[in-house]
């Protein structure tokens, strides 16, 4: 019984750390998006070209899609390539 509890604790601790890492990545991406948007507006950029990795599943749920956010909030045309 003690061994099973240890495994459960280890499993929960592992995913808690992963979630914290993903939250940090999400905050960092948000800062980058804001900076890109401000830079594009300041320099009067007409087109943003960016790549996408096509995240799916759990990662997309937590991180969202960076390309999707840029397309949504950009003031200019965005071309997304895969």
Image (spheres, rainbow, N blue to C red):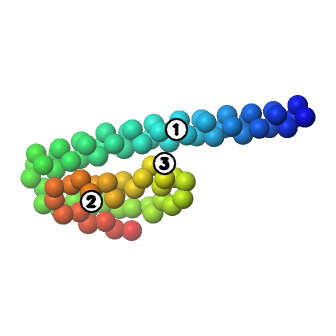
- Residue 51, given in percent of the width and then of the height, sits at 35, 62
| Circle 2 residues within 10 Å: few <14, some 14–19, many ≥20 | some
Q: Earlier in the sequence, mark 2 or mark 3?
A: 3
* Depth order, front residue of 36/65: 65
Q: Earlier in the sequence, mark 2 or mark 1?
A: 1
Give the mark toward the camera: 1 or 3: 3
Q: Secondary structure at mark 1?
A: helix
In the picture of the structure, the residue carrying the numbered disc 2 is 71
Q: Are marks 2 and 3 in contact (CB under 8 Å)?
A: no
Taking the image as shown, residue 28 lies to the left or right of residue 34, namely right
In the picture of the structure, the residue carrying the numbered disc 3 is 62
- Residue 34, given in percent of the width and then of the height, sits at 25, 43
Alpha carbon separation for disc pair 2 and 3: 18 Å
In the picture of the structure, the residue carrying the numbered disc 1 is 21
Residue 74 location, quadrant: bottom left
Q: Are marks 2 and 1 in contact (CB under 8 Å)?
A: no
């Amino acid at each position: 019984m003690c061994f099973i509890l240890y495994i459960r604790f280890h499993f929960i601790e592992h995913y808690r750390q992963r979630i914290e890492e993903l939250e940090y990545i999400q905050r960092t991406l948000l800062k980058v998006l804001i900076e890109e948007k401000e830079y594009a507006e300041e320099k009067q950029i007409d087109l943003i070209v960016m790549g996408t990795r096509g995240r799916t599943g759990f990662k997309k749920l937590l991180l969202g899609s960076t390309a999707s956010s840029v397309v949504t909030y950009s003031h200019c045309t965005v071309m997304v390539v895969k």
